[in-house]
Image (tube, grey):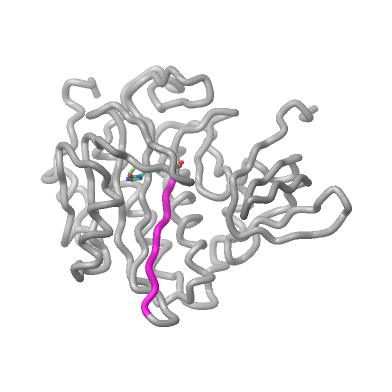
């Protein structure tokens, strides 16, 4: 498909999606500050589970740890899902992994690229970042009020930053963003319907099979701390298990990972 024709089209999307948790409330905007921001506002106003905010362009896209998410308009996928799961707060993290898995598999199927999941929230091709996920949630009492899963995925452009990549850059062709969006939603829904309290382990093997950092020497920044070690795997609830330099096993729920590529053989 040529880039001229590749505009996001809610009609095509709804037609391809068919009956779905996500077909009732797709909010599409050409320009928006941030899909996560609008999804959160809608969540606070009582929008239902399965609402989706999709934009062609963001003027204030947000990344993790207060960083900006910069993406040219009309080229990429930028969207946020609003969920109201019955999970306990400590299992929310499994939803990030579930979206990462769904997006990873959808991209692999459409492009044949060897995309991997870089725990906890990125997709990579080789040593370059293809997509990032920003998960935000709010509690009500001891339970979850809502979860917003926002993803930015580089599709039809050529990023200039040396640590980033995009599907066009990797495949040499343009990809239909409507098709890819639908593919991600369908897979995510298929997985999400089976995720329930205490049962977040369903996709544990898939996460691990597609993990970029499995067995690698890594450095993880979390809670103002930096820890080095070998990544042993991802646990049932999405936590990373590492063996630190003193040989102790540690479970880390969230953090920023740097892979020590130079130690690869
Ligand atoms: C990261 O890698 O730091 C996460 C990036 C998440 C970016 C997406 S783009 C759609 C959604 N809206 C936002 O403002 N951020 C997320």
Residue at the far front: name it. Answer: 224
Relative horizontal placement of residue 231, taking residue 244 as reference (left or right): left
Quarter-wise, where is residue 252 in the image?
bottom right
Residue 237 on image: x %, y %: 58, 66
Out of 178 and 257, give the one closest to the viewer: 257
| Ligand 1 lies in quarter | top left
What residue sits 34% from the left and 22% below the top? 157
The image shows residue 114 at horizontal and vertical percentages of: 54, 34
Residue 188 x, y percent position in the rendering: 38, 56
Question: 95 left or right of 24?
Answer: right
Q: Is residue 105 visible?
A: no
Answer whether residue 16 is magenta in the image: no
Left or right: 9, with 174 as reference point:
left
Q: Residue furthest bottom?
A: 141
Vertical relation: 254 (above or below) 143? above
Please provide the residue range marked out in magenta: 133-140
Quick one: quadrant of the N terminus?
Answer: top left
User: As rendered, which of 60 and 249 lies closer to the eye?
Assistant: 60
Secondary structure of the magenta portion, mostly?
A: strand
Residue drawn at (30%, 41%) of the image: 78
User: Image height check: is 149 above or below 123?
Assistant: below
Seen at 53% across and 35% down, the residue is 124
Residue 211 percent location from the top left of the image? 61, 46
81 vs 64, left or right, is left
Quadrant assignment, res 174? top left
């Amino acid at each position: 498909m040529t880039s001229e024709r590749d505009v996001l089209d809610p009609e095509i999307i709804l037609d391809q999606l068919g009956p779905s948790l996500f077909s009732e409330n797709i909010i599409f905007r050409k320009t928006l500050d941030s899909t996560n921001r609008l999804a959160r506002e809608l969540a606070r106003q009582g929008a239902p589970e399965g609402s989706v905010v999709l934009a062609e362009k963001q003027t204030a896209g947000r990344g993790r740890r207060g960083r900006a998410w910069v993406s040219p308009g009309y080229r990429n996928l930028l969207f946020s899902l609003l969920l109201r799961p019955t999970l306990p707060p400590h299992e929310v993290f499994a939803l990030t992994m579930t979206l990462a898995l769904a997006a990873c598999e959808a991209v692999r199927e459409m492009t044949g690229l060897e995309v991997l999941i870089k725990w906890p929230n990125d997709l990579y091709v080789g040593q370059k970042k293809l997509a990032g996920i920003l998960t935000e949630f709010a509690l009500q009492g001891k339970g979850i009020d809502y979860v917003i899963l926002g993803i930015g995925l580089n599709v039809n452009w050529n990023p200039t930053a040396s640590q980033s990549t995009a599907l066009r850059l990797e495949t040499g062709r343009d990809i239909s963003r409507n098709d890819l969006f639908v593919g991600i939603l369908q897979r995510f829904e298929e997985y999400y319907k089976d995720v329930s309290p205490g049962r977040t382990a369903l996709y544990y093997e898939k996460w691990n099979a597609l993990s970029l950092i499995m067995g690698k020497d890594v450095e993880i920044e979390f809670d103002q701390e930096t820890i080095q070690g070998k990544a042993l795997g991802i646990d049932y609830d999405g936590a990373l298990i590492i063996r630190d330099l003193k040989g102790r096993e540690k479970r880390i729920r969230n953090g920023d990972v740097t892979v020590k590529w130079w130690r690869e053989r």
